[in-house]
Image (cartoon, rainbow, N blue to C red):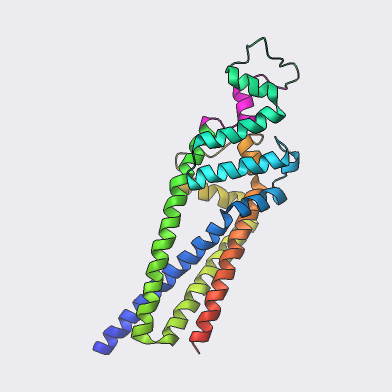
Amino acid sequence: MISLTRKLIVLALSIVTSVALAYSLFGLGFMVCTTPQATSLIGGTFSGWEHATYPEEDMAQIAEAVRSFSIEGTSSEELYNTIFTALQENQPQIAALFEAGSTQDNTIDTSLLESTNLTQLEEEYSLPRNALSHLQDCTPIFTTGRISVGVVGAFGVAGLIALGILAGRKRLGATLIAASSLVIAVLIALGIWAAIDFNGIFTWMHTLLFAQGNWIFDADSLLITLFPEAFWAAMAGLWILSSIVLALLIGIVGKILAR
């Protein structure tokens, strides 16, 4: 009876630990994608910033400011200062309109502008209120995600230690292999879905995370030119690759322990 109870405890602990480790590996892969280096590399390579609203160098600086604001919670003042600096350097007329707060200022020459609609100009050259609201909604998601990866990862490590004590290194190795296999299986499934219907999985994720629905913007808005579909597709690829590499490393360690 004691032996059966022990086996059931070990089995349950193995399952919970492998799921916790898989979640952590999945989360760590995503955290790789949200680094400044990843944003710069993906944006500069896939986002077409050389033909965007501002020169490529300015687009890279604005993208980093958006990343810092939405992921790390830096101030909106820092974000708008970065945008306005680029605006003053490249579109001084539009910058003057924004400072005046109106398109009716006769001292500003708007004859060369395609549009003098302030709302439209704000959408194209800055981040209007709805865009800022969406970015603010991202911050708690990223913060909660990072905390959960740390907490769940710590639980996974504790589970591994407990398994090592209760059942030895072979069970430890089997649990690592199970976690690795789970990550790879889930990511392959998501990768196939993304390859077949990227818009579908993108919409599903945003509907799930942003039930209020404030994540749809015009194609020529600054936010979309900063992060077009190609950017997110490349980020998804980096996420999958990073998590699979981590999973393979864990799987290799598991194979060694399970011998």
Give the vertical position of 102 relative to 70 (above or below).
above
Q: Residue at x 63, y 11 (%)?
A: 105
The image position of residue 159, as x and y in percent, is 37, 74
The image position of residue 208, as x and y in percent, is 47, 48
Question: For residue 33, what is the image quadrant?
Answer: bottom right
- Please say whether residue 197 is visible from this viewpoint: no
In magenta segment, residue 120:
yes
The image position of residue 158, as x and y in percent, is 37, 73
Give the vertical position of 251 relative to 204 (above or below).
below
How many discs appear?
A: 0
**Horizontal placement of 119 versus 168: left or right?**
right
Q: Nearer the viewer, residue 109 or 233?
A: 109
Question: For residue 218, what is the image quadrant?
Answer: top right
The image position of residue 204, as x and y in percent, is 52, 50
Give the vertical position of 167 relative to 26 (above or below).
below
Q: Residue at x 54, y 71 (%)?
A: 247
**Horizontal placement of 222 versus 258: left or right?**
right
Q: Residue at x 47, y 68 (%)?
A: 22
**Horizontal placement of 8 versus 197: left or right?**
left
- Please say whether residue 176 is visible from this viewpoint: yes
Per the rendered image, the range of residues in magenta is: 114-129
Q: Residue at x 52, y 68 (%)?
A: 183
In magenta segment, residue 112:
no
Find the residue positioned furthest to the left: 1
Q: Quadrant of the N terminus?
A: bottom left
